[in-house]
Image (cartoon, rainbow, N blue to C red):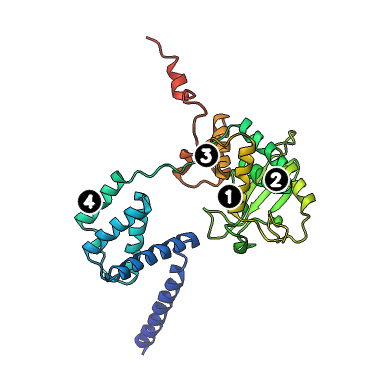
Amino acid sequence: MYFISYYVISAEKFQRLLKQAEHRKKFAFTPGTKSNRMAQIKMFKNFCTEFGQDSLNPSEETITAYIEFLAQRLKSARSIFNYISGVRSFLKYNRQPTKCLDSYHVDLLLRACKLTLNQPSRKKESVNFKEFRSICKACDALGAKGVLLKVSVTMCFYGMLRQSNICPRSSKSYQYNKNTSRDCISLQDPGLVISLPWTKTRQEGGLPLQVPLPGLLDPVVCPVRAYNKLLKLQPTKCPKQPLLAAKDGKSISCRLLARWFNQAVELAGLSNKSLSLHSLRRSAASIMAHSGVNLAQIKTHADWQSDAFWQYISAQKPADSAVARAMQSLQC
């Protein structure tokens, strides 16, 4: 009798563990990754429907044709690898074999995509501090929208923030627990602190990321003065209101903010450079690195958690290299 009851209890615990595991699997992907996976799977299913292929049991020829289909549209080898990874996840989810993805000819075609698809670099250029100041000065000439833009420009530079930290993709997608609101900004002498509830690398929740910004004597580039000017233009009526809002109270979108930034860049006489708000993030990181700031501290301040950080640190001049300077001391 004892063994029977023990078996029943163990079986119940086992089923409970399976149920808890199913619940935990829901958190395997961040919202952004999940959205990308769904788009990749949808693309593959639409391809199979259009060409009369079986999406649940694709052949090697189906995958080969799909890769060529992607190559002619995406023009990026990296994107093709991501979409094929989506197909692999789709087949595994449906407990189907993935042998068709591991064949020699599929591997050969993926290697060929790396060599034949030369995607132009989308990396934005950086600015020096003088150019950054000219952009801030151009914001002052744009009126009310310039006030909002200057807040974003100074925060992206001194806080090394991503554009997604400033405003959502669209005014309708604003979320208080994800996007930066007035409640996230606190004035702390001599500067201010931004408490980010969500970032690209912190999507699972937890404690907000605290980003300090300095108070400066130069009124043109001071982030504290820029924010105080925003408070006069748009007083805080509710702590949950967006950091940057339009006249109707809704958050402005990333696209609108980018359009304003391009106007400021043109007024500053920098239209010949490929710039975006993200340029300010990498510019500040490079300037701080060349000023002798510890790289680990820069990574923490800018919320970098991968080796992509090194791609943002660029020499201000080609000859400005510590290795080159050290070699100058070499003598026979």
Amino acid type at circle 4 is Leu
Q: Position of residue 103 (x, y in %)?
A: 21, 58
**Distance CA(mark 3)–CA(mark 4):** 35 Å
First-in-chain label (3 vs 4): 4
Direction top: furthest residue: 332
Relative depth, front residue between 84 and 144: 144
What residue is disc 2 on? Answer: 146
Amino acid type at circle 3 is Ser
What residue is disc 3 on? Answer: 274
The disc at residue 163 is: 1
Direction left: furthest residue: 104
34 to 13, vertically: above or below: above
Under circle 1, the secondary element is helix
Label 2, residues with CA under 10 Å away: few <14, some 14-19, many ≥20: many
Amino acid type at circle 2 is Gly
Direction bottom: furthest residue: 1
Q: Point out the image quarter for the C terminus.
A: top left
Label 1, residues with CA under 10 Å away: few <14, some 14-19, many ≥20: many
Q: Position of residue 120 (x, y in %)?
A: 40, 42
Tell me whether circle 2 and circle 4 mark residues in contact (CB < 8 Å). Answer: no
